[in-house]
Amino acid sequence: MAQIEREDIHLISRHSNLTASTIKNLLQNQVYNDRSAWIKFLKLFFISLGVGFTVSGILFFFAYNWADLHKFAKLGLVQGLLIAATLTAVFSKLSQDIKHILLTGSAILIGVLFAVYGQIYQTGANAYDFFLGWTVFTVIWAVIANYAVLWVLFILLINTTIFLYAEQVADHWSDIFVMALQFVINSLFLIYFLKRPKDPEVKTPEWFINLMAISAVSFATLGIVNGIFNTYEVSFLALIIITLALYGLAIKYGWENHKTIYFAIIPLSIIIIIAALLIKISYDAIMFFVITLFVIGSVTLVIKNLIDLQKKWKNG
Amino acid sequence: MDNELKLKEILAQLALTESASFQYDEDAMQAEQKHRSNNQSSLSIKILSIIGGFLATLTFLGFLAITGIYDSKISMIVLGILFIGGAILINLKTDHLLLDTISISNFAAGLALLVFGLSEVGLGEVVLSLLVMVISVLTMYLTKSYMLAFLSFAAISSAFITILMTFDNYNLVHIYLALYTFLLCYWCLNESKIISMHPKLNALYNPIRIGLIIALFSGLIFIGARGIIGIQFNFIWLTSIVNALALLYVVWEICTILEVQSPKTKIYVYTLSALTILITFYSPAISGSILVMLLCFLVNYKTGFAIAIIGLLYFIAQYYYDLNLSLLTKSLILFFSGIVFIAFYLFTNYMLKGNEKI
């Protein structure tokens, strides 16, 4: 018996004389959630609310008393939590998923520990110091655990460290150079994750790859738009060349591996860049009209292309 | 093709179980299904359409601003009407996804121009809003596009809230909330009745459902985020009571699905519901989110369910953030609420372990 979906029921109802009561029965049997789904949901709902509220309560309690705690107590508390979380993650017999979540929590706690330290001793360190330390101490866990969310945290930390370093220490670096740097680094990560030997047990999740791709393309786009509106410099030329090369590679990869996302974000990036170019050329009314037409036309083309690709690859 | 065979199979099943009077137009169904799969739009494509249409509208309005058209009221009105007409015409003639982007941006730009132009001429807010409502209803009736129907519905809701706001009494927002809560409940719970009423209404069912949810949550944000409008809380009971009644009805439906039979369990369930309603009485945003969450789970509408959960988390966080109590008191409240919920979890677990029938 075919699984009837909601869209099917709507479609059939549009072109037939099915009665309301028949439709109601169909919906209740095939579409609406049944008893077992409800039980699962209710249990999950209550336990999530329960744990969430209880933990928040404990957090708020510590927040209230924080100022009065002795500094050793503060540090000891965070360190204790960190050690407990990590030991549980490594040695307990919980499921792999929970262990990964615990380890990610530990990685976050590293940051909290450094923050508390900085607050107590007023080290007055540049913010980038803090992130650099946090990054360095997370790298081993990220590599070994090989858990997507932890990788995201790690890569986020790297990006933040670079950004803050450029802002606070190396302020002779131009904006474009920084964005080009971040583009290259994020792309390198993306390529690493795509090309590394496939582990039969652990598959790199699709959402993670897509997130990396989007972040890399965002940096490239921001960098080039920035370059368009600022004075010319060598980094801009270098960025354009690298972007062209990497975009080409990405399209090739997407084509060979039937990944539509590259055919969405790269054209979108190019559309934004061209729109920026057009604005740079002239600020006239005519130009805005041209940009409007261009945006409509190009987005339409991109969508049409995506649909065609989707169809071709679904049947291919 | 896969879908074609599946449809045939479903129809064959239905023909067996239905009475002799069951008639259906299979060719039309197959044609529409084929058309749909040709124009399949995933969520990302829908979003891309909206962003593209939005950007195009903005740049076009920018273009118009530069040409100085905002000085001429008549041309604004005329252009507005032309664009809206154009959007509807495009939709009537073809149902191609590609033209969706254009018709969306036309509709939005046309509406904006019309509203600007007419307000410059001196038309009052109420009349203007009513006009927008009429145009939107007409558009919804004529259009075959999901996006355009959704946008028209959003326009109707905006016009409605504008009318309410002209009375300079922010408490009227509760009328909006109460009405939309009721409409959403009715719409979700009577899916079978609505889609069998008329093919046009059937096609509008999905866009209106998401339209109602988004309109409702937009309104709830005004209640939930206290800083935005200075709302007196005198009339908050209106929304809360509608939420309470709706929640009790939904809980009753859930009990039927869960096949709850023992009166003791029923008492527990209704006490829990009454407690929740009482606690969230001064925060209808929270009770509203819970209601929408339960409704969407009931009818297995995943998008609405996700929106409701995000809304619930946001409103709870907002509520505790705004609470004018010391951190210590807040921490105790949170902690004990947490214990209560864990108790409910254990209760649910226990109820279902020993005996199958609760």
Image (cartoon, coloured by chain):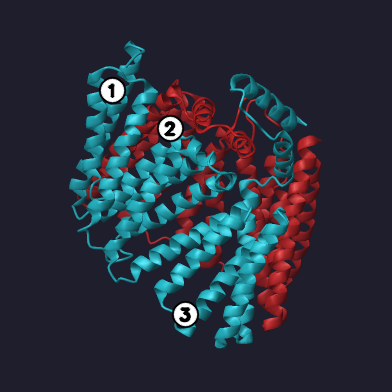
Q: Chain of mark 1?
A: B
Q: Chain of mark 3?
A: B
Q: Residue at x 20, y 41 (%)?
A: B332
Give residue B83's mark: none
| Type of amino acid under label 3 | Ser
Instruction: Confirm whether residue B98 shows in the render.
Output: yes
Q: Residue at x 23, y 51 (%)?
A: B237
Seen from the viewer's position, the closer of residues A280 and B96 is B96
Chain shown in cyan: B
> What residue is pinned by disc 2?
A86
> What residue is pinned by disc 1?
B347
Quarter occupied by residue A83 = top left
Which mark is in front, 2 or 1?
1
- Please tell me whether mark 2 sits on a helix, a strand or a loop: helix
Chain A hue? red
Residue B131 relative to residue B99: left or right = left
Seen from the viewer's position, the closer of residues B92 and A179 is B92
Tell me, yes or no, whether dots 2 and 3 are on the same chain: no
> What residue is pinned by disc 3?
B119
Instruction: Please rate how many residues cluster around mark 2, counting C-alpha atoms within 10 Å: few if below 14, some from 14 to 19, many from 20.
Output: some
Q: Residue at x 63, y 49 (%)?
A: B44
